[in-house]
Image (tube, grey):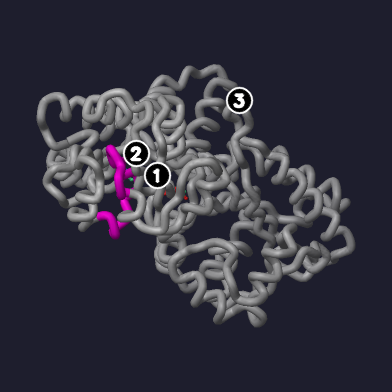
Amino acid sequence: MVSSTCLAELGHDVEIIEIFEDKVRSINLGIPPIYEQGLQEMLSRHAGNRLKATTDYSDIANSNVILICVGTPPKNDGSADLSMIASASKAIGEALKDSKDYHVVAVKSTVPPGTTRNVVMPTVLEHSGKCSGEVGFVMNPEFLREGLAVQDFMNPDRIVIGSYDEAAGDLFAPIYQGLKAPMVRTSLTAAEMIKYASNAFLATKISFSNELGNVCKRLGIDVYEVMNGVGMDHRISPHFLNAGAGFGGSCFPKDVSALIHLAKDVGEDPILLKSVVEVNERQPMRIIELLEKRVGNLAGKKVAVLGLAFKNDTDDARESRSIPVIAELIARGAKVKAYDPKANSSMSKIYPAIDYFQSASDALKDADACLVMTEWPEFRNLDKEFDLMRSRAIIDARKVLSCKDAEGICW
Ligand code: UDX
């Protein structure tokens, strides 16, 4: 959604192929089916003009460049499910059958190294009846953060283009004309790995900060002060060192798991990556331990959970750290009073039976304890609202609160 709208902004004619009709209708009316800062304004400029959505694959033959942007969710064993990649490739191949033109098929989805070469290429070629050279293949990972995706698209740190041959990369690269960023031209597999390595490294930084934060907490040190000093080293950088509840979202958890799976598949034991996941899985349990230390047995206690989205500025609750925390609260007999500025509805699909509120104050009323789980700016100045609780037992899992009596998870 973001890439296609931004490509239209860069001046291209873009057609989105989407299997859900309600999303197609919404996009064509200029209403994005997801919330993303700045997207609505940009989409309304281009919907119906340079940007159109359809459920019909047949128009693909009129495009020079075809981007595959489907999901690659984790399977039960942690490996990436490539079924949507395969079915998109098949449909693209069929749509290109009668075309006489040269087309470039580019994979934007995050896929394990080898997927573009071993799944996308043969599937497109088989179903189009063409041979390699008649269709070009590119792997072009995205590095967009949810909530800041439009900004990230327009101001990338780098653009990575892996290609099967030079010609495909040359035809593809100009789609980013107008953006100022270094371009990394490389092989298909290296491009695929750059995406996994980037996400795994960022996740490692977060788990590192969390592990260190847990040690700091025992020593009475504020890990944020420590990381402030650490991050000033330009070799480290200050970003992604924020300790707290751990990482969630649609990318880090699944991509680290997929990389672990991949490493094992080729006979390596990914010790570091396994620990990154383990630290991340333990972190929510630390919040519960702190909570019990403060209020004792949780059975029958009312616990306000502020923040359900996996991070601020999104309505997305996928892999949110609130999910395991709420599961544990329910298992221990607590009554959960939940509030999120945007993600109440997403979380209600996961936990339909807990109580959702329309404001932090409503959720806090009569609560025995409060957990702040997402770094929403609107939580920063909460203070007198906590007086609505039975007692001010407040645990901040994101270092977002400014009130003095909140207890931090790693500080
Ligand atoms: C991430 C990558 O940043 C992006 O490049 C990639 O394309 C997709 O995955 P996203 O999942 O949108 O983006 O969110 P991000 O801002 O990276 O945060 C991921 C999770 O890490 C969130 O749960 C966030 O709260 C957590 N986080 C982030 C921390 O706990 N500490 C930090 O210092 C930074």
Judging depth in this view, the residue of 279 and 112 nearest the camera is 279
Residue 119 seen by the camera: yes
What residue range appears in magenta?
A: 364-379
Mark in the foreground, 3 or 2: 2
The residue tagged 3 is: 77
**What residue is drawn where x is 24% and y is 34%?**
409
Q: Give x and y (percent) for residue 332.
A: 41, 25
**What residue is drawn where x is 73% and y is 45%?**
121
Contact check, label 3 and label 2, Cβ < 8 Å: no
Q: Secondary structure at mark 1?
A: strand
Residue type highlighted by circle 1? Lys
The answer to whether 2 is drawn above or below residue 78 in the figure is below
Side (left or right) of 394 relative to 185: left
Disc 2 residue crowd, few under 14, some 14–19, many 20+, Cα 10 Å = many
Q: Give x and y (percent) for residue 243.
A: 26, 38
Q: Which quarter shows the C terminus?
A: top left
Disc 1 residue crowd, few under 14, some 14–19, many 20+, Cα 10 Å = many
The residue tagged 1 is: 337
The residue tagged 2 is: 303
Q: CA separation, marks 3 and 2?
A: 33 Å
Mark in the foreground, 3 or 1: 1
Q: CA separation, marks 3 and 1?
A: 33 Å
Q: Secondary structure at mark 3?
A: loop
